[in-house]
Amino acid sequence: MASPAGAARSTTLASGLRVMVLPQPQLHGAHMALYARVGSRFESTATNGLSHFLEHMLYRGTPSHRSAHEVNDAFESIGGYLYAATQVDYGVFSVTLPPESLDEACGLFAEVLRSPTFSDIEIEKEIVCEEILEDLDDEGRQVDADNLSRTLIYPEHPLGFTITGTADQVRAFRREDLAAHHARHYTSANSVLVLAGAVDPDVAIERCAQAFDAFPRGERIVTPAPVHAQKRARLRVVDNASSQTELRVCLRAIPEFAPQRAEMDMLMRVVDDGMSTRLYHRICDAKGLCYDVSASYDGYEDDGVVDFAAGVQHARTTVVLKEMFGLLEDLAQNGPTEEELAKARRRHRWEVDAMRDSPEDMAHYHGVEMLFDHTPSLDERIAQNARVTAKDIQRLVSEIATPDRLNVVAVGLLSRGEASKLGDLVRGWRGAAGP
């Protein structure tokens, strides 16, 4: 397939499906991905885990390829590999393959997404139940610190659900449940299709129009935003026989597409964008308290969470938490240095430039942005981040680092004394008072 240079192209097919093509003519591979609004935040207590189980079942056969083996063999025989993942608020199916295979792949890809047969349902249930066991202890209790933190933050909203659900729920799902969930979520109004790499936009759009002409139009799925009813800091300590305590320090933050999104990006780069940035240097290099410590931001369309994570010796849990509080307090009161901001701007620009060499990264960035109706270009993102000042970051930290946004989870073997000290520190924290 030819691959001329050109700008990104977007269109809406007759079926209503939005398509974006991102030509990267310097590359030798192509990537195709469908993003859909599906996941645990669109489920109820009765259906929790159904989106993830449906993701597995879409591999399990089509009218033309009757089994999981036949589906996978079909993609692999044309140089590709079918990939899928379910997140809290979206799901993705994708395939990376040689450009000359794109014509054949479009039809196959559309058939997998449009016409699953849901064969071997009982076999796949056992596979998913094995996956669920990874987050449980020997007694079947949830011990995954990330899952526990979301339940603590969102006790009455689906954002607090696990993505996989429970084994009992998965074993109760019927073929009719899968068909109804598939018909509701895998539709043109609820999805976007992105192609990137060595692709000709005109030819790619024509092939997609042929392959997805029968994709059902459907409706865009929406759910209520979570209410912020928290009044004070929350703490959950879970006993678990392990060599370390898994600590999660979570701050309810801003939505993914909030006006302060650039400030959040730069804040996270100042805090944790390598071993020379503040978090690792303070806790590991300077004080030797941890081997593994990190910070991340999870953004949703109507909310967000900043996570600090560490694996620590049980007796050091409170000390590490105190250091994390100190880091936030220092940023709120003094802000980052100009040197830190300049370095963060450079690293962001370099990362964006590297994305232009990856069809997978380009498709993911634009696919998620388009799915949630937010379409800044990469150059616009660079410019937005470059405008962030130290005062902007001070204000953001002061806004989110408050007791009514704080949720702490510790999973490990804390002594009674350590658990008591941890509780006193969490309850006594007054937040990061900035200017």
Image: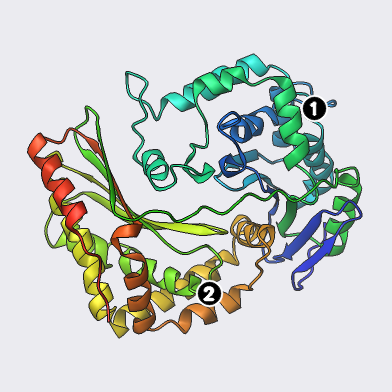
- Image location (x, y in percent) of residue 322: 16, 57
- Of residue 419 and residue 79, the one placed in the foreground of this image is 419
Q: Quadrant of residue 82?
A: top right
Q: Quadrant of residue 194?
A: bottom right
341 sits to left or right of 292? right
Residue type pointed to by label 2: Pro
Compared with 385, 274 (above or below) is above
Q: CA distance from mark 1 to mark 2?
A: 43 Å
What element does badge 2 sit on?
loop
Would you say residue 29 is visible in this rendering?
yes
385 sits to left or right of 284? right
At x 57% / y 31%, what residue is drawn? Answer: 49
The residue indicated by pointer 2 is 259
At x 31% / y 85%, what residue is drawn? Answer: 338
Q: Are marks 1 and 2 in contact (CB under 8 Å)?
A: no
- Image location (x, y in percent) of residue 185: 73, 42
Please give the label number shown on residue 62: 1
* Disc nearest the viewer among 1 and 2: 2
- Of residue 386 and residue 315, the one placed in the foreground of this image is 315
Please give the label number shown on residue 256: none
Point out the tag, 1 or 2, that comes first from the N-terminus: 1
52 sits to left or right of 26? left
Compared with 131, 84 (above or below) is below
- Image location (x, y in percent) of residue 125: 59, 19
